[in-house]
Amino acid sequence: EGAADSLQNGITATLSSTLLVGRPLWATRTLVLLVNVPLAILGASPLVGSVLQLFLLANLVCACCALPLLAALLRTPGARKLVTEGAVLCGCAGGWLGLTVYGCLERGSLGAGVRMAWFGNNYAYDYFLAAILASASCLAAGCGWQARATRLWAGIEMATAAEG
């Protein structure tokens, strides 16, 4: 399964290129270790019954984040203004939350819903669809919020310029 390796490489690249720019390599390695310790504990816990459940978890995280991250790669000027870091984070978090809510609605309780959504759905397509749709909806909401904030800010700047 390549999803777990890809996720590890993505975490390392993101941390080293954004949070730790100009820092020594040992800082990146230490931060990656700190991120991976909770994941290793999760993998060794009774919550995860097999390695396939870990792969399912990694694939669902990727499904939640794929659309917002791909939207961030758009090069058009309009997309660059709307698809900000906040919109991407909103899309990813919305995918996670939407998938969890879908699991809870399917199972009727929080604990059973979280377990089913993230570890026990046996790669059922509807859980992946729920993650992608929730992610897309929240990405659109984040972009809409950004557009509204941009228009509001432009109006404030125009009013300030007219007064001065």
Image: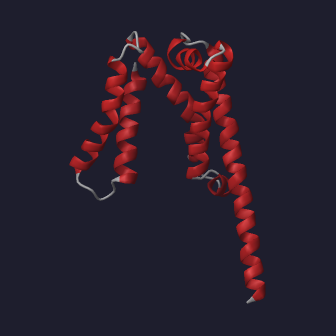
Corner quadrant of residue 150: bottom right
**Residue that sits furthest to the bottom in the current view:** 164
Name above or below for residue 49 compared with residue 80: above
**Residue 32, percent across and down?**
31, 39
Q: Position of residue 57 (x, y in %)?
A: 47, 22
- For this rendering, which residue is in front, 148 or 62? 148
Residue 48 lies, in percent from the top left, at 41, 14
Residue at figure coordinates x 35%, y 17% from the top left: 45
Q: Is residue 67 above or below residue 156?
A: above
Q: Quadrant of residue 117?
A: top right
Numbered disc total: 0
Left or right: 118 as drawn, with respect to 30: right
Residue located 52% across and 16% down the image = 115
- Where residue 72 sits: x, y (%)? 57, 47
For the point 27% across and 56% down, the residue is 23
Q: Residue at x 66, y 47 (%)?
A: 142
The N terminus: image quadrant: top left
Relative to residue 149, is residue 89 drawn left or right? Answer: left
Q: Would you say 24 lies left or right of 74 here?
A: left
Q: Left or right? Give the position of 80 relative to 11.
A: right
